Image: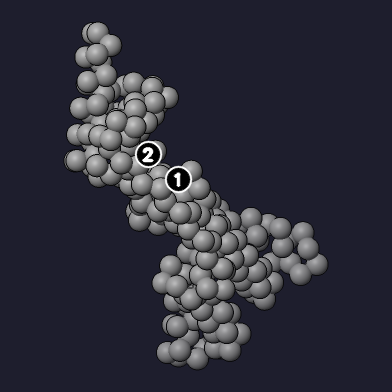
Amino acid sequence: MTNDSKEAKITETIIQVIKEKNPQTVEQLTTLVKEKTKIPEKEILEHIIKLQNAGKIRLKKQTPPTPMKLATYLKTEQTIWYWATITIAIATVAAVFTIPENFYPWIYIRYALGTIFVLWLPGYTFIKVLFPAELHIKTSQKSLDTIERIALSLGMSLALVPIVGLLLNYTPWGIRLTPIVISLLALTLTFATAALIREHTAVPKQNIHHHKDTRQ
């Protein structure tokens, strides 16, 4: 293949990708073209710049978004999971210490909240720390889907709770109801807060290299 035909093929592929996929950044455009042509990214970027200089495509500059303050972020819909987690955790602790064992039928509320508190919240918040919610782009496969997150959350809860019990066994408090509840509450609140902070800082970081939008 001659250089002219190779460049013509790259040009055709770039324009086709822009029309069909409508990539929002140079990075996305480069990734999509590379998938189709197997050409190195550096060469694709050089060709994109040539097309821009020739007026065949237009690269629109994008102003980096101003990072949202944490206090403001706490009021958005994205943090509903955080407030729900905190509410359930605190409600569980309140139910454990206020509802007696033989107080029917209210004891079932304690059982229900306790199940969520032990089998779900520790693992869920831990997974949120490791995998904060990400912005979904057409070329990204890094975020967990719902089924994976549920499975990992249950599995991590089953792993973390025995570890907490084992550590308490070597403390003066021992494995009793009050130390276990307080320990799991502290663990859940710590993981949830750490996950919230990671989620808050993840959005600006994802756009830090996206300096330009690419449109025909």
Q: In front: 95, or 44?
A: 44
Residue at 61% in and 85% down: 97
Q: Amino acid at mark 2?
A: Val
Label 1 element class = loop
Q: Is residue 34 above or below residue 181?
A: above
User: Visible in this render: residue 47?
Assistant: yes
Q: In front: 73, or 211?
A: 211
Q: In front: 130, or 114?
A: 130
Name the quadrant containing residue 7.
top left
Q: Is residue 91 above or below residue 17?
A: below
Label 2 element class = helix
- Residue with the most extreme right position: 172
User: Residue 102 at x, y = what percent?
Assistant: 52, 89
Q: What colour scheme has been applied to the protein in the rendered image?
A: one colour
The answer to which of marks 1 and 2 sits earlier in the sequence is 2
Q: How many marks?
A: 2
Judge left or right: residue 184 versus residue 113: right
Q: Counting other residues with Cα less than 10 Å from the Cα at mark 1, is it few (<14), some (14-19), or many (20 or more)?
A: some
Name the quadrant containing residue 180.
bottom right
Mark drawn on residue 211: 1
- Residue with the most extreme top position: 2
User: Residue 29 at x, y = what percent?
Assistant: 32, 37
Judge left or right: residue 23 versus residue 27: left
| Residue under numbered circle 2 | 26
The N terminus sits in image quarter: top left
Judge left or right: residue 59 versus residue 70: left
Residue at 53% in and 82% down: 91
Q: Amino acid at mark 1?
A: His
Whether the residues at callouts 1 and 2 have beta carbons within 8 Å, the answer is: yes
